[in-house]
Image (spheres, rainbow, N blue to C red):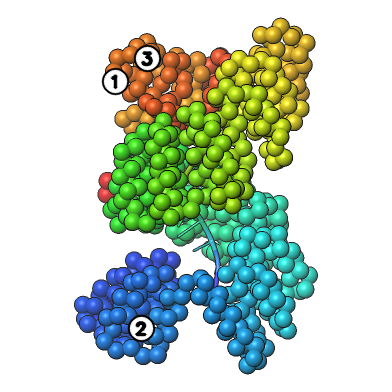
Amino acid sequence: MMREQNVYPNAHTFAGVFTAVLGLRDPLGVGKQAHSAAVKIGGCADVFVGTSLLNMYCKLGLVLVARKVFDRMPERNSVSWAAMISGAFTLPDVIDNGKQIHCYAIKNGGLSVVSVGNAVVTMYGKCGRLDDAVQAFELLSNKNAISWSAMITGFSQSADSENALKLFSKMHFSGMMPSEFTLVGVLNACSDINAAGEGKQVHGYLVKLGFESQIYIMTALVDMYAKSCCVADARKGFDYLQEPDIVLWTSMIGGYVQNGENEDALILYGKMQMGCILPNELTMASVLKACSSLAALEQGKQIHARVVKCGFGVEVPIGSVLSTMYSKCGNLEDGNIVFRRMPVRDVVAWNSMISGLSQNGLGNEALDLFEEMRSEGTKPDYVTFVNILLACSHMGLVERGWGYFNMISNEFGIVPRVEHYACMVDLLSRAGRLKEAKEFIESTTIDHGLCLWRILLSGCRNYRDYELGAHAGEKLMELGSQESSAYVLLLSIYTVLGRREDAERVRRMMNLRGVNKDPGCSWIEMKSQVNVFVVGDQMHPQVKEIRTENGSNQGGNWANKYGLNQRGLEVIGARGRWSHQFRDVDEEPLNLFNPQLKILTLSLSKMGSFINSGTSA
DNA sequence: GTAGGGTTAG
């Protein structure tokens, strides 16, 4: 408005602008614009303006940029120094210095001032020093809502959600009214432990207090429902607010992705673009993940183009998901290019590329990359080992697999998870060492529910070990499995063995437990069209070519091009699996009226037009 | 003093 009225800003106007942008939702873009405008009129030479600018960059986490500004300042005052110093602290510095300041405050009676005490609680909470935070919290003689919120948020941010909830209930009974900050902390705690029940109670409570139109609260609420697998409830919350901001859009899109509703995620993204809402890096990461899960290469490329247009680059997290997206679509070269171009590669980025290689059948390369990762000093995490063990599994490297399995705890001090045990059972089963796999399952004390037996069962199917298969199948039934494939397999085993009574028992159990047989299906995108294949499917217009040309050894045949195997059902890459959803057990009459399939094909075509219209602009 | 993200999976 000021500029509309032809009043030109002077240097000091910009100082105000730099401070004001920090309150915006997407401060960096506006801040950078203001920065270059200020440079044009030479405003940054002013100590006051320069200090506001470096303060802005510090608050946005861009300490190096702030340092550049600082170094170029012709004049600095105590505020500039303070801003630069506080911006440059790293976490260990903060803890050490925070402790000193804490002592200083105690000595000088500062803690009797509640705001100082609250700051201490917040500081310890943010650093994950919960014991210290609790101590500081309990020492507060007169706690206000901020004190309670600080402590609750501290718990929930340090993944101690149970204590967050306990403290919230204590706060409630003490008669203290919660603020929006309290409720955001509590909702995050609920989503962290998947406590939809508690989350709903908090939801009811906050409606009573009239907080439901507050955008921070609604975002936390949407996230809570999405993380508790109540994506429809999340959507209700999203629709409730008339003007969702980019964070709320991103939460909802991400909520769909987390729940595997990738088509809905892309449709919502299309809608967002129609509303001319600008995405940010986090939005793009979620949307790309949706493309990656769908193996929708064309959509993914378009969104990649948009990422470039927005100037987002291939930093974490976009780089990781882009690399995954290309690898999952069988385009390892581009996946690798993205990976190599990432300026900083964290453990997730390495994991992406390792899994890309292993999924495409390049297990040795995956293991080499793991070594490269270690030599570059990146510490592997538990996902790294899942990928490594899967690579061993694909190549049948049993002994090396054992080596890596032991390495998890021995060399890296990571407690092996169910996933690692599952990989080992998979590795042993695929290698035909079924007895060993069974002994491994029986020897472990880890709480694996059903999954290890299920993996062994499919291994037994591949090697036609009926006896062991029946054992695994019975275990699954005994443990109350709801999965149709286990029952179907067990049924066919007993049929083959002629054990009619047992077969009949399995059938009765299926009816009793209401286990349904869903046909397996896969899909692949070719030239912007999604081809869906269902078990026993003869409906594809080119099904003849798909079925007959496959199996012949001519180079570049349909099998390689379309990634279909002989049965024409399972989507496989040229050198391995990709985009494969369900594997079928026995041939089942085809149900093309399965509502899920309809949704899949229809929504993909719809969303194509949304996205095209969005990116061609 | 508050909200959203990427890597695994039979």
The answer for which chain carries disc 3 is: A
- Label 1, secondary structure: give it: loop
Per the model, the C-alpha gap separating discs 1 and 2 is 63 Å
User: In the displayed structure, would residue A251 be above or below residue A103?
Assistant: above
Rendering coords of residue A217 (x, y %): 58, 63
Rendering coords of residue A465 (x, y %): 63, 16
Mark 1 / mark 2, whichever is N-terminal? 2
**Residue at point 25% right, 73% down?**
A36
**Contact, mark 1 vs mark 2 (Cβ under 8 Å):** no
- Label 2, secondary structure: give it: helix
- Identify residue for label 2: A51
How many other residues sit within 10 Å of disc 2, few (<14), some (14-19) or many (≥20)? many
Rendering coords of residue A371 (x, y %): 42, 45
Residue type of the residue flagged with mark 2: Thr
Q: Quadrant of residue A556?
A: top left
Marks 1 and 3: same chain?
A: yes
Per the model, the C-alpha gap separating discs 3 and 2 is 68 Å
Whether residue A183 can be seen here:
no
Residue A431 is labelled as none
Q: Quadrant of residue A46?
A: bottom left
**Residue at point 76% right, 14% down?**
A502
- Identify residue for label 3: A550
Residue type of the residue flagged with mark 1: Gly
| Left or right, residue A144 beside residue A275 | right
Mark 3 / mark 2, whichever is N-terminal? 2
**Residue at point 55% right, 45% down?**
A407
Q: Nearer the viewer, residue A14 or A432?
A: A432
- Label 3, secondary structure: give it: loop
Q: Quadrant of the N terminus of chain A?
A: bottom left
How many other residues sit within 10 Å of disc 1, few (<14), some (14-19) or many (≥20)? few
- Identify residue for label 1: A556
Q: Nearer the viewer, residue A109 or A466?
A: A466
